[in-house]
Amino acid sequence: MVRESVVRALGAAASVAYAALIAWLTVSQPQSIAEVTGGLTASIGVYRVDELAFEDGLRFFHQDQFVEARAAFHRADAAGRDPRTQFYVAYSYYREGWGRLSHDDALYAKGLEAVDRAIAVAPGGRIVVDDPGLQMHSADELRAELVAGTTREWSDVNPVRVFRGRK
């Protein structure tokens, strides 16, 4: 027979684990089961990105197929826990929302959310991506560009702006 003290100890341990799970869910506020499992696996260091889906996303991204790229990136990183993948998601919103005369504020806002998510999960909050096809390689550069695109200032009506290229 199992002794009463062992049963009590197991019950106490299960209660503490359940309370820790509830506290983590309250703090992180995951929006889906994938985010829950991704957050739990990331917290113990076993979270992995689907490399095949990530490569599909990169291929779409470099062909300027941004909606398709984001779909592949979301498949690769369903929990939104990989900084590099979230960087590319944010960059895809930037590129799709960029225009010579104006920017799409809704896409830029989604890009800001994605780059902030990437910075939040990156070790030390620093992301640098070595991709020769990009003109911005750090999350800080990308974030600054997205913020600049959503602010209104007098330089927005400068006609020389038409000659500025997309990064």
Image (tube, rainbow, N blue to C red):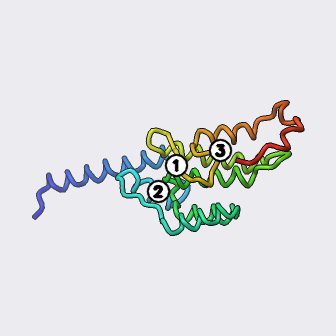
> Callout 2 environment at 10 Å: few (<14), some (14 to 19), or many (20+)?
some
64 relative to 12 in the view: left or right: right
In the rendered image, the residue lying farthest to the top is: 154
Q: In this view, does 33 lie above or below 111?
A: below
Badge 1, how many Cα within 10 Å: few under 14, some, many 20+? Answer: few
SS label for mark 1: loop
What residue is drawn where x is 22% and y is 54%?
Answer: 10
Vertical relation: 12 (above or below) 38: above
Judge left or right: residue 136 versus residue 79.
right
Amino acid type indicated by mark 2: Val
| Residue, disc 1 | 29
Q: What residue type is labelled 1?
A: Gln
Residue in view at x 45 percent, y 57 percent: 38
Disc nearer the start of the sequence (1/2): 1
Residue 83 position, x and y percent, is 51, 50
Q: Where is residue 22 in the image (x, y as percent from the top left)?
A: 42, 49
Residue 139: x %, y % from top left: 58, 43
| Label whose residue precedes the other's in the sequence (3 or 2) | 2
- Left or right position of 28 against 132: left
Q: Which one is in front, 37 or 57?
A: 57
Helix, strand or loop at disc 2?
helix
Which of the labelled discs sits on residue 112, or is there none? 3
Viewer-nearest residue: 132 or 79: 132
Numbered circle sitting on residue 49: none
Mark 3 or 2, which is nearer the eye?
3
User: Closer to the N terminus: mark 3 or mark 1?
Assistant: 1
- The residue at 58%/46% (across/down) is 137
What's the distance in space between the residues labelled 3 and 1, CA to CA? 19 Å
Q: Which of marks 3 and 1 is in front?
A: 3
Quadrant the N terminus occupies: bottom left
- What secondary structure is found at the residue carrying circle 3? helix
